[in-house]
Amino acid sequence: MKRKYHLKSKLFFALCFFPLYLFAQSPQDACQINLNFDYAVEDLEVSFHNSSTGYDSVFWEFGDGTSSHKINPTHHYEKTNAYKFCLTLTDSTRQKCQKKFCGQVYIFDPCE
């Protein structure tokens, strides 16, 4: 008899509290970062413009070993090349909310 009661109590717990767990993990708690940016290249310099929303921390990697926490950085590359850059946005108010985009920028000097 004790076993049946124990099984019933587990079933009761699962049916009553599991939906509450699902509700607590609802999409309203999901990451709300909207990643949006553009950039302009002029000679060896790139101006990045970040118009993203829903974040509180920004991290740019420029592909040449340097990085920045500025929202809209301007970066000077030392030589012509194709560089992989990345933008990482974090919302620290939501657990594990981070979005990252990587792309490639082509730097060339028209005088070369």
Image: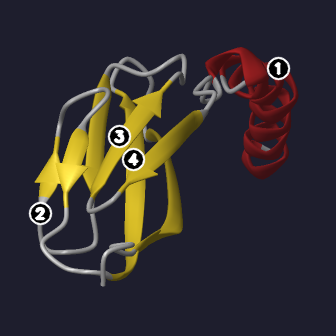
Identified at 40% across, 59% down, the residue is 86
The residue carrying pointer 4 sits among few (fewer than 14), some (14 to 19) or many (20 or more) residues within 10 Å by Cα, namely some
- Viewport quadrant of the N terminus: top right
Identified at 30% across, 84% down, the residue is 112
Q: CA distance from mark 4 to mark 1?
A: 39 Å
Q: CA distance from mark 3 to mark 2?
A: 15 Å
Q: Is residue 10 above or below residue 33?
A: below
Q: Earlier in the sequence, mark 4 or mark 3?
A: 3
Q: Earlier in the sequence, mark 3 or mark 2?
A: 3
- Amino acid under label 1? Cys
What residue is shown with label 1? 16
Q: Quadrant of residue 109?
A: bottom left
What residue is shown with label 3? 47
Q: Give SS at disc 1.
A: helix
Could you say where residue 108 lies in the image, as x and y percent from the top left?
A: 38, 75
What residue is shown with label 4? 88
